[in-house]
Image: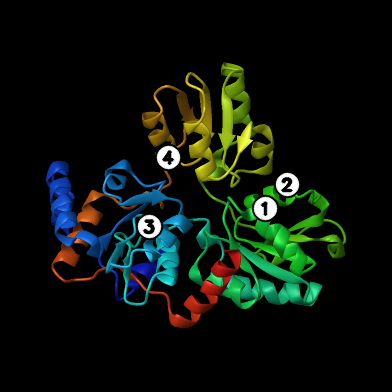
Amino acid sequence: MSVMEMLQNKNSSMLPEHYKTMQVEEMENRILKIKRRMGEKLFIPGHHYQKDEVIQFADTTGDSLKLAQVSADQAKAEFIVFCGVHFMAETADILTADETKVILPDMRAGCSLADMANITQTERGWEVMQQEFGDTIIPLTYINSSADIKAFVGDNGGATVTSSNARHMLEWALTQKERVLFLPDQHLGRNTARELGIKPEEMAVWDPIKDCFEYEGDLKNVKIILWKGHCSVHANFSVYNIEQTRHADPAVNVIVHPECSREVVEGADYAGSTKYIIETIENAEPGTKWAVGTEMNLVNRLMSQHKDKEVFSLNPHMCPCLTMNRIDLPHLLWTLESLAEGNVINQIQVGESVSNKAYQAITRMF
């Protein structure tokens, strides 16, 4: 769903002006009072990439799938106020009970990566791929994708993947069909395939804008079809950043997320999921130095939590993700006060047909 479609949704609303001029302390106190008053009826999950001003009120933190799973376990919660982005709230709505209401405080909170694959493009591309390869392809989609894409994958025998289990899921997929379509992040797909020993010449990129393969050679040799999508944050880390970091201090450990390009992952000392990055730095020896290639809010949090180590961004000019960074104190307070008054705003609702098919894709991964 595009930002415009989100804002036109009958369940979406815009932040009233008076919230924009409130003092931080007043907003924090009002949020705490509502949380105490609503008790177990309210559950607030917070994604790792969210601002500290919001994370301080989260009942749990984690990656998108973990937060959706934990939300589904909150049997007494009537409202899940998801401090994350649209696709994460969709996943929570898919996994939670029908009577549970999932709410996104700011409907503009999205993911540029998830937006790089829509259902119209995917169905159009799939038709071309079927003509080219026949019934030899199984689709996989990164959890960072819309409910529509998850439903498409579920309906075609595929599954979702996370950055933690992508290798295992790709291995599974290759036992099901001769070829795999990997949506929507080409870098995670390429890095995972390379871990399994799949050669560059066995991978083709599908361009959904031009409706064509980016590939030189005989397509019959292709095992992995990579959707031409990427994370705008992780694409900003470069080999040059690694070279400059090591030139300044050879003792620095470079750790990056697998949404970075293949060249950056190969040049780093460590690469893994957000959870992997967090745990690696937590378990590192005091005094060690870490250049981290991932979203800036998380890097800043790691810096403040691990003052016994030197932690900094691999790219010194990196800014927080603009679309991931939408939810703030005014939006959170407005959402909670609306709920306290009996007014549900910005509810995320995935239609039954899409939800059922997307659920298949998610549960196949489990």
Image point 69% across, 36% down: which residue? 266
Pinpoint residue 304: horizontal percent, then vertical percent. Answer: 36, 30
Q: Verify CB contact (< 8 Å) between mark 2 and mark 1.
A: yes
Badge 4: few (under 14), some or many (20 or more) residues near its Cα, within 10 Å? Answer: many
Is 216 left or right of 300, judged from the image as shown? right
For residue 82, side relative to residue 364 (left or right) = left
Q: CA distance from mark 3 to mark 1?
A: 29 Å
Q: CA distance from mark 1 to mark 4?
A: 24 Å
Q: Position of residue 200 (x, y in %)?
A: 79, 49
* Tag 1 and tag 4, C-beta contact below 8 Å: no
Residue 45 in which image quadrant = bottom left
| Dot 1 or dot 4, earlier in sequence | 1
- Whether residue 242 can be seen here: yes
3D distance between C-alphas at marks 4 and 2: 26 Å
Q: Amino acid at mark 2?
A: Glu
Q: Is residue 319 visible?
A: no
Residue 167 tag number: 1
Residue at mark 2: 195
Labels 4 and 2: the sequence-earlier one: 2
Q: Earlier in the sequence, mark 2 or mark 1?
A: 1
* Above or below, 86 relative to 288: below
Q: Secondary structure at mark 4?
A: helix
Q: Which is more N-terminal, label 4 or label 3?
A: 3
Amino acid residing under circle 3: Ala
Q: Which residue is mark 4?
A: 298
Q: Earlier in the sequence, mark 3 or mark 1?
A: 3
Nearer to us of marks 3 and 2 is 2
* Name of the residue lying farthest toward the bottom: 353
137 vs 286: above or below: below
Residue at the spot of label 3: 109
Looking at the picture, the colour scheme in use is rainbow
